[in-house]
Amino acid sequence: MATKKTISLVLAGMLLGTNLLVAQVNSTTTTANSVSPVGNAGIQSGRNSNVPAGLQGVEVGGDDIVIPNAPMITPSSIIEISAVGMGVAPESTLSPAQALALAKRAAIVDAYRQIGEKMYGIRVNAQDTVRDMVLKNSTVKTKVMAVIRNAEIIETIYKDGLCQVNMELKLDGKRWYRILTGENF
C-alpha cells in the first residue's frame, strides 16, 4: 500500500485584513483535500464545482501552490502601516555628529524596508548545499522593491550608539486597492 505524501501549507497575508488560509494538498494528485479559515477570515465559495470553495484562482503546478493574497479593503478605509527602524553608529567616524547622522540614516532606510515588506511582500531566495548528508552551505537572500511616499517619522531615539526611528504611513484604501488589483470600486 503506497503512502501519500501531503504538503501542509499556511499562507498569511502581509497587509491588514487579508485572508489567512490553511490548505492541505495531496502532492500526488495536486487537488486540495481541505481548506479552512483561520481566525475571522472569511472564504467565498467558488463558482467552479471542480475546485473547492475558497480555492478559486489557486494555481497548482508541481510542488508550487499559489493562493492569491486578496486584501479585504473597503473604499472608505485608511490603512496605517508602522515600522521601527534600527541603525547602529559606526565606530570609525570623524565625529559623534557624523556617527549620529549615519545611524539615523540607517534606521530610516530600515524602517522604509519594513514598510515596503508590509506593502508589497518580500521575495526570498534560499539555497542549501548538502554533501554526505551534512549541510555544507546555506544562503538566504531577500529582496524588496517598493515605492513609498509620504511616510512620516513619528519619533527618533538615539541612545548608546543605537538610533531607533518610528515611522508611519497612511494609505487610502480605495487607491491602494486599485494599485494592487488594477480594478476600480
Image: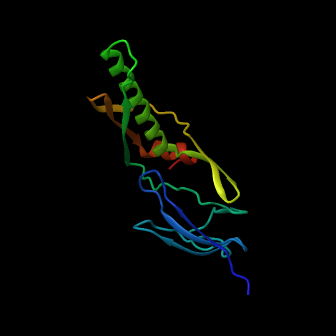
Residue sitting nearer the eye, 55 or 108: 108
Residue 57 seen in render: yes
- Residue 44 percent coordinates (x, y): 52, 68
- Can you say whether 64 is above or below 168 in the image? below
Quadrant hosting residue 56: bottom right
Residue sitting nearer the eye, 146 or 43: 146
Horizontal side of residue 37 vs 102, given as left or right: right
- Residue 33 percent coordinates (x, y): 61, 77
Label tally = 0
- Residue 176 percent coordinates (x, y): 48, 43
- Can you say whether 73 is above or below 47 in the image? above
Horizontal side of residue 1 vs 156, given as left or right: right
Residue sitting nearer the eye, 104 or 171: 104
In this picture the colour scheme is rainbow
Residue 183 seen in render: no
Residue at the spot 27% in from the left edge and 29% down from the top edge: 160
- Can you say whether 116 is above or below 12 in the image? above
Residue located farthest toward the top when viewing the structure as drawn? 94
